[in-house]
Every structure is written in C-alpha cells, then in structure tokens.
Amino acid sequence: MLVSISMKKLLTIIVLGLLWTSFGFANCTVGNCINGKSTYVSPSGNIYEGEFKNGKPHGQGTFTYPNGGKHIGEYKNGKREGQGTQIWANGNKYTGEYKNNLINGKGTATYPSGSKYVGQFKNGERHGKGVFTWINGDKYVGEYKNSKKHGQGTMTFSDGKKLVGEFKDGDFVK
C-alpha cells in the first residue's frame, strides 16, 4: 500500500512537471525565449517582446500589460535596469533610469494634468533635487524626500509670490 501511494505521488509530480514545462514554453510565440529575440505571452496576458538571455528578459525590450500600460527599455536578468520609459494606463509617464526593477536615478515624470517633474528618484519616489511644474504655472525647485518637498527649496506661485527656505514632509516651515 505504501509503495502504491508513493508511485501515485511520483506520477503526479512527473505529470505536473511536464504540464508546467510545456505550458511555460508554449507561451514563447515567436523566436528564442532562452537566448535570442522573441515574443513571450504570460498566462496573465502580459507580453514581452525583446531580447532574452538564460530564459529571462535581458537587453532591449518592450513589456505590454493587459491594462494598456507599457515599459520600453533595458532589462538585465529579468528586471528593468538602465534607461527606460514606463507609460501607465492612466496616462502617467516616466522616462529615465532604473535600478533593480525600480525607478532610480535621474528622470522625468509627466502627468495627464500637464504637470511635470524633472529630477532625481529613489525606489520609485521623487527623492533628491528636482523641479516640479504644475499646469497653472506654480513651480517648486528644491529637495524631495519620499515624493514630498523636503529640505531647501523655492516654491514660486503663478501670481509671483514665493516661499524660499526649508520644507518638511511637503510643508513650508521657514
């Protein structure tokens, strides 16, 4: 009895393994998804078109999401790395540097409202020196921390008024 249960488990593992392997490679629709250029469609509907190395996106590629979002840029070992452009389904757009799959370094973010941020990012947040310009003409030039005005900066309003000094957690303090 013990032997037959073990054989059933072994058979189940083998069958599932074969199905998973076939399923995984069946999504490589064109080209070579191991080492080369190809198109890969995931079970969730994500599409990656570009270069592969060791079965992972590596080099230039375009990743398209089912919701209409898209990332065009450099990949390394399956992660966004280097220069890239991310366009979200809601119209937000980022062009700039990526590190370890996150927005990191210098970049530009634009928003459907017409607002724009040019500056430094860390782990997907505005962080460091940057300039944020609103559609109404307001403009902040200064330091950011966790996407909030934080540190030395100048907030210039469209009517010409200015706040110059220190900001903390998004608020002017002096």
Image (tube, rainbow, N blue to C red):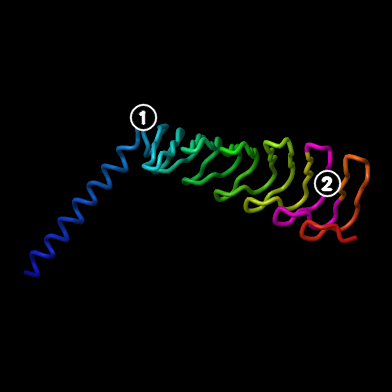
Could you tell me how far apart the alpha carbons at marks 2 and 1 are, in whole angstroms?
A: 47 Å
The percent coordinates of residue 125 (x first, y second) are: 67, 52
- For label 1, the SS is strand
Residue at the top extreme?
30
Amino acid type, callout 1:
Val
In the image, residue 128 above or below residue 45? below
Q: Residue placed at 52% from the left, 41% from the top?
A: 75
Magenta extent: 135-153
How many numbered marks have been drawn onto this rendered protein structure?
2
In the image, residue 136 above or below residue 155? above
Residue at the bottom extreme?
2
Query: Residue 110 lies in what quarter of the image?
Result: top right
Instruction: Look at the image and tell me in which quarter the C terminus lies.
Output: bottom right
Is 140 covered by the magenta stretch?
A: yes
Q: Nearer the viewer, mark 2 or mark 1?
A: 2
Count neighbours of disc 1 (C-alpha within 10 A) and say few if under 14, some if 14 to 19, many if 20 or more: few
Instruction: Look at the image and tell me in which quarter the N terminus lies.
Output: bottom left
| 112 or 141: nearer the viewer | 112
- For label 2, the SS is strand
Q: Which residue is mark 2?
A: 141
Q: Which residue is mark 1?
A: 30
| 166 or 40: nearer the viewer | 166
Is 158 covered by the magenta stretch?
A: no
Q: Residue placed at 81% from the left, 58% from the top?
A: 171
Query: Residue 40 lies in what quarter of the image?
Result: top left
Kindly identify which numbered label has been placed on residue 128. Answer: none
The percent coordinates of residue 96 (x first, y second) are: 65, 40
The percent coordinates of residue 108 (x first, y second) are: 70, 40
